[in-house]
Every structure is written in C-alpha cells, then in structure tokens.
Amino acid sequence: MRRLSTILLLLLGTVICFGQNSLTVEAPQVVSLGETFRVVFSADGRMSDFNWPGSNDFMVTWGPQQGTMSSTNIINGKRTSIHQETMTYLLEAKAEGTFTIPAATAVIDKKTYSSKSVSIEVVKGEPASQPDAGQTQGDNRVQQPSSTNISNSDIFMKLTINKSNVVKGEPVIATLKLYTRVDIAGFENVKFPTFDGFWSKETDTPQNVEFVRENVGGEIYNAALLRKYMLIPQQSGTLTIEPAEMICQLRVRSSSSSSRSIFDDFFDNYQTVRKRVSTPQVKVNVRNLPAGAPASFAGGVGDFRMSTSFSKDTLNAHEAASLTVTISGKGNISMLEAPKVNFPPDFEVYDIKTTENISSDGTSGSKSFEFPFIPRSHGEFQIEPVKYSFYDISKDKYVEISSGNLRLGVGRGSEDASSGVVMPGIARQSVKNLAEDIRYIITGDANLKKEGSFFAGSGLFYGIIAAVAALFFVISAILKKGIERRRDVIGSKNRKANKMARAKLKLAGDYLKQNLSAAYYEELHKAVLGYVSDKLIIPVADLSKERIREVLCDKGVNNELIDSLLSIVDACEYARYAPDAGHEAMENHYNEAVKVISELDGKVKNNTKNKKVGKVTMVALLIGVGLYSADAQTINDSLGVAEPQAVMPSQSVSDFSSSEQVDGIGGLWKQGNEAYGEGQYNNALNYYQMIEGEKLISPELYYNIGNTYFKMGDNAHSILYYEKALKLDPSYGDALNNLAIAQNFTLDKIEEVPDFILVTWIREVKYLFSADVWAWITVVLAIAAAVLMLGFKFASSAVGRKLSFIFACIVFVVAISTFAFSLSEKSDAQRRSHAIVTVPVSSVKSSPGDAGKSIFVLHEGTKVSLRDDLGEWIKIELSDGRQGWVPANSIEII
C-alpha cells in the first residue's frame, strides 16, 4: 500500500509536454490565480544562446535557473552517454483567462531549435494539492482538509457519456474519471458500472492511475481516467447505467486545537481515512431503428464506405484466391456482419476470415471480410455486386452502397491444360449446396385428430389388449379340447361312426348291384349295428335290442325311428338264414337303412350341440362387450378420421381470398396449400389457423404453419410450430430439418448441459417413433407374445416349448418397454413445460416484477423451460442452467 501511495503522489505532479526537435517545454494546463508554478525548458545536448522573451501575462518570480544532467551507460561493452540541460522559471498568474507562454530558442550542438508555445488556463479557484502534501515549489500553500471536514466537493467520481439520445446500435462513449483535491493513498472495493441492455467494450484501461489538472466549475482538480467504454445499445427504451463506486483511502492532516508553529510543517501528524464515492445513475434514451430495412442491412449504424479487392490479378483454375470486402468509417464497427457474396456455382468457397482495425475509442476504423475461394473451371466470371446497407444517423435513413459487378478471368489450370492428349476422365467433385432453404409443406393427408386424443393409453388400445388376452384363452381352450379329443378313443369312435357306416353301406350297395344276397345283408347288418355301437358308445357284448331302445330313448329319439332301426336289424338277421327275398326287397332295406342312419345321426348331433351353445355364446358376448367398451370417438381419432365440418358464415374466407367457399376441413387444408404454393402466405396462414381453431391437430398441420411463419419472416413463431410438430412426433424428419435452419437465425447461442449418456440413448430410442406408433407396436408385440405362449403350452417337442418360452419372455419385455415409451411420449406431448421467446428482446429479471434486476437478455426464437409462475410473470430456465423471470406475454408455450 505504501508503494502504491508513493507512485500516486509522484504522478500527481504530471504535466503536459510540448516540443519540437530537441527543445521541449513543460508547464501545467491549469493554474489558479496567484499560484506560483514552474516552467521548464529542456534540451537533449549542450545548450547555448538560450533566449525566452518572457510573458506580460505572468510574473517571473524566480529564474532562470540552469540545470545539467549527464549519465554514461555501458551495456555489453557498448558505451552510451546522455547529456541534458534545463532552464527553469517560476511564474505567477496575474489574471484569469487563457494565456500563451511564447516559444524559446536555443543553440543546441551548433543548431538552432525553437520550442512550441504553451496555452495555460488561469482560474480563480484554489490549486489542487501537490504531491508534497499541499505545497508548491514557491509560496502558495494550500490548506489540507482535516479528517473531519472532507466533503463531496473534495473528492468525487463521475461517469460522462458523449450522447444521451441515440438509436439502437449507435455507439456511445462513456468515460469514468476520479476528481480529487486531497491526497489519495489507495483504493478499496472498486466496483465498475454495469451496462444492462448494451454491448460494451473497454477501450481504455490504464494500468497506472495518472492524475492531470482539470478545471471543474472554476475549481482546479487532479483528475484521473479510470476507464473508457464504447457502448452499443441492443434494445430500445430508456436504459439505465448502474453506478460505479469505490472506497478511497485519503491521507489527511490530523486536527489539532493547539496553536501551530513554523516547525509544524516538518512534524505534522497525518492519518488515513476512508471515503466511499460513487457515480450517479446515467440514463440513455434509445430509439428503435425505423422499419423497412433493406435485405442487405447487416446491423451497421453510422457512416461507412466499402471497398473490394481480389488477392490475385491473374488466376488459374484450381488455384486458391480470396475476395476481400472492407467496410470502413465511423459507427458500430465491431457489430458489423459480413455482407453476402454470391459466387458462381463452380467456385468452392470456404469460411470467412474477419479482421478488425479499430480506433482506440472503438467508434471508427475498418473491418475486413476475406472470402477464400477456389475456381474449379476456367473462363470469364462475373460476381454479382456486393451490396451493404447501413443506417446513416445524420441523414436519418438507410443507405445502401454497392461494389458494382466484379469480373474475374480464370485461366486453364495445369490439370486441364490442353496438351493434345485425350484425358481418360475428369476430376470428380461432391455436389455442393448453392443455397439452403426449408423443405416444402405437406400436401397429402393432414392426418388430423382432436386435440388431446391419442391411441396410446386410450380405450381402444386397452380394448385391443383385452381382446388379445381373451382370444389367447379361447384358443388355448380350443387347442386343449382338441388334444383331449385325440386322446379319447371312445369319443373318436363316436365321431367316426357316420364315416364307418357310410363305408359299410357303400360295400353293401356294391353287393346289391351284384345281387349277392347273403353278402349284402351281412354288410348291411354290420353297418347298422356298427353305427349304433360307435354312436351310442355301447359295447358289442351289450348290444341288444332292449339296450339300444333304452339308450335311444335317453337321447330323445322318438319310438317310430327306433322301431324302424330295430326292424332293419331283424330283417337282416332273418334274411341271412331265409331264402332269397328278391332284389326289390334288398333295395328297399338298403334305402330304409340309409334313411334311418341319416335321421338318427341328425337327432344325436343336435342334442349334443344344444349343450355347447350356451358356452360359445357366452364367450362371444364377452369379447364383443370388451371391444365395444372402447370409445367410438377414440377409435376415429386414433385412425385419423375427423368428421367433415362445414364452415360457418362467420368463418368465410372471403375476407382474405375471394368469394370462394370452403367445404369442410379438407377444403381448408387444400386451399391453404394452394395459397402457400402461390406465395400468398398470409392467406395460407389464415386457412391453417381456421383448422387449428376447430381443435384439430397433427404434426403435418403444425409443420405447414411453421413453414408459413418462416416464409413471412416470423422466425420465432416458425420455431414454435416446428417444436409443436416434434412434440407430437419426435421422429418427424422434415420438422427437424426446418427447425435447424430456423434456429440458425436466432441470436442467442446457449450451451446445453449434457445428460448422462444412458439417458441420452434411451431418449434417442424413444424418439424414433411417435406415441401412437409405439402403442401399435405394443399391440403387435402382445399378439406375438400370445402366439409364442401358445407354442410353449401346446408344442409337440420339448425344444419347441423351450424356445417358445424364451422368445415369449423377450417379446414380453420389449412390449413393456414400447408401452412405457408410448405413455412417456404421450405425457411429454401433454406437458406444458417449454416455451419460445416471441418478442424481439426480453430482459430476464432476478425476481418477478419491474423491481427485479436485469440479469441477462434473451432474443426471439430462444427455447426455455418453464419452472414456476406468479401473476403475469413466469420463471424460466435455460439449457445451461441459468434461471430468471420474464413477462408472460414475452413467451408462448409449446
């Protein structure tokens, strides 16, 4: 601290030096009336015939006093000598005003030199303290303030600006100075001003605090430059520069009530006191730039000129060169953006290199933009004029400057020079983008659905899953029943009775045709009794007429049919031992047997079916009820079906198109697409918004609205609707592409805090499909799992059952994952957790309300997360973790 104090005290006596050649003069800029001050003439060499005519405006109180200084240095064997002579005068100011000290002449080393004249301002106020604690090299003694009477006029800090009414982007110079009339021993707790709403740059940051005399309101102060800034306002309105402040350590004389003597000057007591000084708030009124800026406007505010040049006058194909565009002048040089240069398609263009050459105050200079390129073919090329627009403050209008057409001749390179030899091919190159634009709108099906409706987690979804489960149990029961039937020998004979009877009857018919009576009746007898045994499940040993009658009566067969059956049996038995009854009798017995067996088979089957009807009907009713429980509207919504709605008279599009009438939602969609294709973006937006007003949504609708806003120049709302489309379908490739292009036009670049890698992987997999697609995949997997479980239960081999079980478990786990993805994406789509800044500039406050301090500024198009709300204020969080409060009307929720 003592070393700093010594340096500051030595700097307090700094004066301005003026000189010409080798004769210089030193004198203060400002002195007080009656103050004695020193004027020193210095010469680098031996001086003779010195002559200074003096001044009638000042009284010489002492001098001239000649001084001499010589020194010799030997460095690395090299000897250097310095000889300097001075002539010193003490002058006293006799009147107020600005006066000139005339030049002096002298012969230095046999040459005559002359100094410059010096202007000195004389004021009435007392002189500021000198480094020797209040005493000059002469008479005038300045009374130092004591520790009890240091006022704000003894030491203060001031921030001045060169202009207080500006337009957005116009440079402002702010100067921070410290003024004092007391000795300063040091500084503490220095806080420099903050410039919310400005782009700021320090243009002067002195490493050592140097004090010079300045006249402030007729009083002499020692003034020191602390900082100098160049400010460029980034938003309109009244911007406030917050105060700077510091604590100064002052060296003052201790108060003493006793009488003073001549020795007190040598034995005075001094102490260090602390005093806080600060600047007042400074307000700057900023106006918006007028509307109607040209397309070539790149943020320049001031007065600029443009020049262009090629790095080479002659150029061959495949050689590197560059075009340099230099913008020079006065204004916000640092904020200038590169102009747009349209190179020929065969030119390979590389990243722009920017070079600045700016003055110390930052308000003038030049900025060069170098465009490296390589021509890939020879010929005469013409580059379109480079245009650059800026806002001229003095003329209060936009001014466009142009370079004119730029011509460049490119010769044949070594690779394609004609040598009389036919080359086997040409140099291939990748296809380059000549420009970048968003992808076109969707012209096909809009896939509209009611807002808030999803197949994922809907009644239809759970109904289908329930139906799959029910079918699994039904098929399991059927397959199980089939296995049991195959294992039932008696039941199998029962089911084959009719088939066996037909086979025997066919054989009996063959015997009938051959008129073989014995063989015929034997086969007919076997056919009838075999059918009765198999169908009624009666063992052959118990097959008596009484038993047959008893069982048929239990089955509900009428007595007439039973009697017919038994009569055929009797006829067969009688004919086997009796003479031949004749062919006609045999044919009648055959027809009677066929008729009886057919009727008997129908009676027994109907009786069995009636018992099973109740079970089958019950299962069918349960499945039907399960499917019917799904909401019909949910089914329609999940399938993308929307009922046509006629446009009401209040929704007529005649206000913005013609007298055409729109028939239903499909008509609105079609006319919106047609208007977009014709470049009538306002009309297209109106059609799309009418569809949105019907509470119908889809990724395709939001995508088209985002495209329309982008073409209208509303970048913030285009980002908003691309985000809405991706919220419904995160895998929408066109929306992802156009969103990336739109985000290139946003001003804010915010670094995202990376998530844990596993979380990132899961999110990327989840966003492969939309929520409804994941739900349908879940349904398919549920069906596959059910089929595999059937294989596990009913496969014939052990290996088949084992593999079916393993794959069923895997499919079941994947189905659970896809089901979780569908519900998660549905939750994301319904959650109101993010928003887009839709105003040009939004100041983020540390607390809700205008009383909160501005902590940072966001521009339109920036995406934020919502954390809390309080009245008309919403708490937001950026992707890098910073938080703050913004007005609710400055953002729109996705």
Image (cartoon, grey):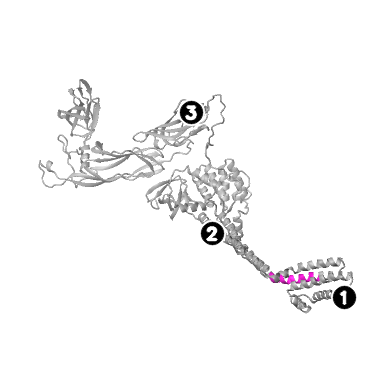
- Which circle, 2 or 3, is nearer the viewer? 2
Determine the image quadrant of residue 565.
bottom right
Residue receiving disc 2 = 813
Mark 2: which amino acid? Val
Whether residue 880 is visible: yes
First in residue order: circle 2 vs circle 3? 3
Residue receiving disc 3 = 404
C-alpha separation, residue under disc 2 versus residue under disc 3: 69 Å
Instruction: Count neighbours of disc 2 (C-alpha within 10 A) and say few if under 14, some if 14 to 19, many if 20 or more.
Output: some
The answer to whether residue 608 is magenta is yes
- x then y, percent, for residue 618: 65, 68
- Which circle, 3 or 1, is nearer the viewer? 1
Whether residue 125 is visible: no
- x then y, percent, for residue 501: 78, 69
As drawn, 830 above or below 617: above
The answer to whether residue 55 is magenta is no
Count of number-bearing discs: 3
22 horizontally vs 343: left or right = left
- x then y, percent, for residue 610: 71, 71
Front-lying residue, 87 or 455: 455
First in residue order: circle 1 vs circle 2? 1
First in residue order: circle 3 vs circle 1? 3
Q: Secondary structure at mark 1?
A: loop
Residue receiving disc 1 = 578
Magenta span main SS: helix
Mark 3: which amino acid? Gly
Q: Secondary structure at mark 2?
A: helix
